[in-house]
Amino acid sequence: MNYENKQHLLDDINKTAKLFIDEFSELSELDKDKLIDGVDRTPSQMIAYQLGWMDLVKSWDDLELAGQTPTLPAEGYKWNQLGTLYQHFYKIYEDYSLQELIKLFNEKLVIWNNWINSLDDSTLFIKDSRNWTKPFPPAWTVARFIHINSVAPFKSFRTKIRKWKKLNSNQ
């Protein structure tokens, strides 16, 4: 993760987000909750995971700017309970159709972009510019948290959904 500036980060987020979400465009609504051996999440869970993390990371910054201290990763969860947190994300979005999830992802991506655009390069790239980053190692800037919770999973989940589609077509 070596970004020259905010625009470079945004370009990477938007490129990987589009590649990720476009993989869902031809999926059947009937398959959105189908778990396939060899892939650890259903298509709807993959999108719910992304929605959950985009909301969560932005909320840390929103809470700090409102004068509050965010609980990381989330209120009621510890870092060793991420599996339970993911189940919470899945539960939030379980009743959404695949098209609604795709639409929501694209809407949240706009919010995510607007938030990042509102931050200056020093806030993004200088360690401890936000208090919620202070407990973490020196390399963990706001930009790193953004990358780890957008670009990185957009890429890895694109691989997962492609594998899911290939395995599903073989069934």
Image (spheres, rainbow, N blue to C red):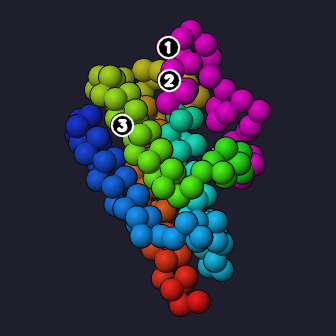
Question: Image quarter for residue 111?
Answer: top left
**Disc 3 to disc 1, C-alpha distance:** 20 Å
Element carrying mark 2: helix
Residue 98 location, x and y as percent? 53, 58
151 relative to 37 in the view: left or right: left
Q: Which residues are magenta?
A: 58-85
Label whose residue precedes the other's in the sequence (3 or 2): 2
Depicted 6 relative to depicted 87: above or below:
above
**Disc 3 to disc 2, C-alpha distance:** 16 Å
Tags 2 and 1 in contact by the CB under 8 Å rule? yes
- Mark 1 sits on what residue? 65
Residue type at numbered disc 1: Leu
- Mark 3 sits on what residue? 110
Crowd band around label 2 with a 10 angstrom C-alpha radius: few (<14), some (14–19), many (20+): some
| Front position in the image: 141 or 23 | 23
87 part of magenta stretch: no
Residue at x-position 46% and y-position 53%: 102
Tags 3 and 1 in contact by the CB under 8 Å rule? no
Residue 23 location, x and y as percent? 40, 66
Residue 110 appears in the figure: yes
Residue 91 location, x and y as percent? 71, 48
Depicted 3 relative to depicted 153: above or below:
above
Residue type at numbered disc 2: Asp
- Mark 2 sits on what residue? 61
Label whose residue precedes the other's in the sequence (3 or 1): 1
| Front position in the image: 9 or 100 | 100
Depicted 141 relative to depicted 86: above or below:
above
76 part of magenta stretch: yes
Element carrying mark 1: helix
Residue type at numbered disc 3: Val
**Disc 2 to disc 1, C-alpha distance:** 6 Å
| Front position in the image: 79 or 137 | 79
